[in-house]
C-alpha cells in the first residue's frame, strides 16, 4: 500500500472510531461514557465535521452537559484543548450553548477571537451571552497590559467595554464589562470601580471588588478589608479573593482569626487560599496544623496540600523579589 493510501486508511479508521463517540452522544437512553470526553481535546478536522453534522440531533440537555463536562475537565487539566470545538459553537442557535462555548474559550489567548467576541458583545440577541462575551474579553485586557497583544487591539477592547458600561445595556453585561476592565491601567477605570462599589445593589459591589482584585492596586485595601466579614456571602467571598489577589499583608491577621471560627467550607477554602497568596508569619504553621487534623478527609487533605504548594510558590516569588530589590 502506498503512503497516500496508508494515510487515507488511517483517517478512515479514526473517523469510524469517532463515529462511535458521536453515536453515544446521540443515544439518550444510555449515559455518555466519561472516558470519551478526552477525545474532544485537539479534535481533528474530520472528527469535528462529523460531530457538527450530528450536533443538531443531539438533545439540548446532552449538548449542555457535554460542554459543562468539558469545561470542568479543562479546569482540572490545562493540557486539554477544546478551542476547535468551541469556536463553531459560538454561532449555535441556542443561547446556553453559545455561553458554554464562550466559557470554554475564556482562557484562550488567540487575538483573532477579539473581533468575534466584540461582535457577540454588541450584537447577540441574548444578554447572558453578551455578558459571557464581556468576561471573555477580560483575557485580552490582561494580555494587552502585559504587552502580549497589539496595543491597538487592547484599546479597541477597552473602548468597547467602556462604551458598554456607559450604555443602557442590561446590568449583568455592564457588570461583566467592569470586571473585565479590572486589569486595565486606563485612568478612567478606577473611577468606574469606585462608582460600582458605591452602588446600593450588592451585585455591583461584588463586581467592583472583583475588579479591585484584578487591578493589582493595593490602594483598594481599605475597601477590601472592610468587607472581609460582610454579612452578604457573595460580597464577603469576593473580598476574600481580592485580599489574596492583592496580597494584602494587612489582611493576614484578620484572615487567620476568621479561619479559627469559620464553619462554612467554601468560605474556609477562600480564606486559606487568600492566605497562601499573602504568605508571611504563621500561615505555613497554621496550614500544616490543619493538614494534620484533616488526615481522614481525603478531599480536604488534597486541598490543603495544594494550598501549601501555592504558599511555597508565593514565598519563593516573594524571596526573589526581595533579592532583586537588594541587588538594585
Image (cartoon, helix red, strand yellow):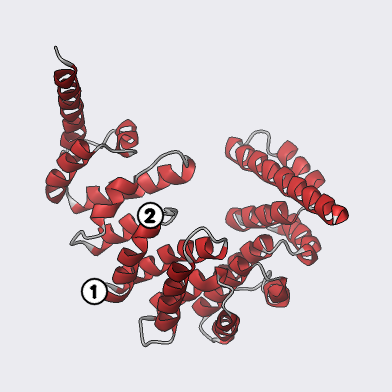
Q: Which residue is mark 2?
A: 105
> At 37% across and 52% down in the image, what residue appears?
104
- Contact between marks 2 and 1 (CB within 8 A): the answer is no
**Residue 28 visible, this angle:** no
Where residue 206 appears, x then y in whole percent? 54, 73
Residue count near mark 1 (Cα–Cα under 10 Å), binned few <14, some 14–19, many ≥20: few
- Using residue 297 as the reference point, say whether residue 259 is left or right of it: right
Q: Nearer the viewer, mark 2 or mark 1?
A: 2
- Using residue 132 as the reference point, say whether residue 284 is left or right of it: right
Residue furthest toward the right?
Answer: 326
**Relative to 168, does residue 30 appear above or below in the rendering?**
above
Residue count near mark 2 (Cα–Cα under 10 Å), binned few <14, some 14–19, many ≥20: many
> At 59% across and 85% down in the image, what residue appears?
191
Instruction: Kindly state the secondary structure of the residue where label 1 is placed.
Output: loop
Nearer to us in this view, 226 or 245: 245
CA separation in Å, label 2 and label 1: 20 Å
> At 72% across and 61% down in the image, what residue appears?
247
Instruction: Kindly state the secondary structure of the residue where label 2 is placed.
Output: loop
The circle on residue 125 is 1
Q: Quadrant of residue 19?
A: top left
> At 32% across and 37% down in the image, what residue appears?
37
Amino acid at each position: 500500500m502506498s503512503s497516500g493510501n496508508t494515510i487515507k486508511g488511517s483517517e478512515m479508521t479514526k473517523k469510524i472510531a469517532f463515529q462511535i463517540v458521536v453515536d453515544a452522544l446521540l443515544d439518550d437512553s444510555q449515559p455518555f461514557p466519561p472516558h470519551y470526553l478526552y477525545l474532544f481535546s485537539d479534535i481533528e478536522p474530520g472528527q469535528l465535521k462529523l460531530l457538527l453534522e450530528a450536533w443538531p440531533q443531539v438533545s439540548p440537555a446532552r449538548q449542555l452537559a457535554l460542554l459543562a463536562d468539558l469545561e470542568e475537565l479543562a479546569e482540572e487539566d490545562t493540557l486539554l484543548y477544546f478551542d476547535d470545538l468551541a469556536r463553531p459553537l459560538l454561532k449555535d442557535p441556542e443561547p446556553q450553548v453559545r455561553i458554554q462555548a464562550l466559557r470554554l474559550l475564556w482562557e484562550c489567548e488567540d487575538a483573532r477571537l477579539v473581533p468575534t467576541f466584540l461582535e457577540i458583545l454588541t450584537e447577540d440577541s441574548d444578554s447572558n451571552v453578551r455578558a459571557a462575551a464581556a468576561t471573555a474579553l477580560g483575557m485580552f485586557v490582561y494580555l494587552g497590559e502585559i504587552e502580549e497583544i497589539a496595543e491597538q487591539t487592547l484599546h479597541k477592547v477597552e473602548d468597547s467595554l467602556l462604551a458598554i458600561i456607559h450604555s443602557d445595556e442590561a446590568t449583568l453585561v455592564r457588570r461583566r464589562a467592569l470586571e473585565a476592565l479590572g486589569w486595565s491601567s486606563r485612568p478612567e477605570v478606577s473611577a468606574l470601580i469606585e462608582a460600582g462599589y458605591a452602588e446600593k445593589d450588592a451585585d455591583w459591589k461584588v463586581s467592583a471588588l472583583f475588579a479591585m482584585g484584578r487591578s493589582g492596586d493595593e490602594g483598594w485595601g481599605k475597601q477590601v478589608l472592610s468587607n472581609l466579614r460582610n454579612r452578604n456571602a457573595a460580597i464577603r467571598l469576593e473580598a476574600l479573593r481580592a485580599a489574596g489577589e492583592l496580597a494584602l499583608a494587612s489582611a493576614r491577621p484578620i484572615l487567620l482569626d476568621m479561619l479559627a471560627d469559620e464553619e462554612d467550607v467554601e468560605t474556609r477554602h477562600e480564606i486559606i487560599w487568600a492566605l497562601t497568596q499573602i504568605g508571611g508569619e504563621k500561615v505555613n504553621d497554621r496550614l500544616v496544623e490543619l493538614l494534620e487534623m484533616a488526615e481522614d478527609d481525603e478531599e480536604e487533605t488534597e486541598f490543603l496540600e495544594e494550598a501549601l504548594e501555592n504558599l511555597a510558590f508565593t514565598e519563593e516569588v516573594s524571596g526573589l523579589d526581595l533579592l532583586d530589590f537588594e541587588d538594585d
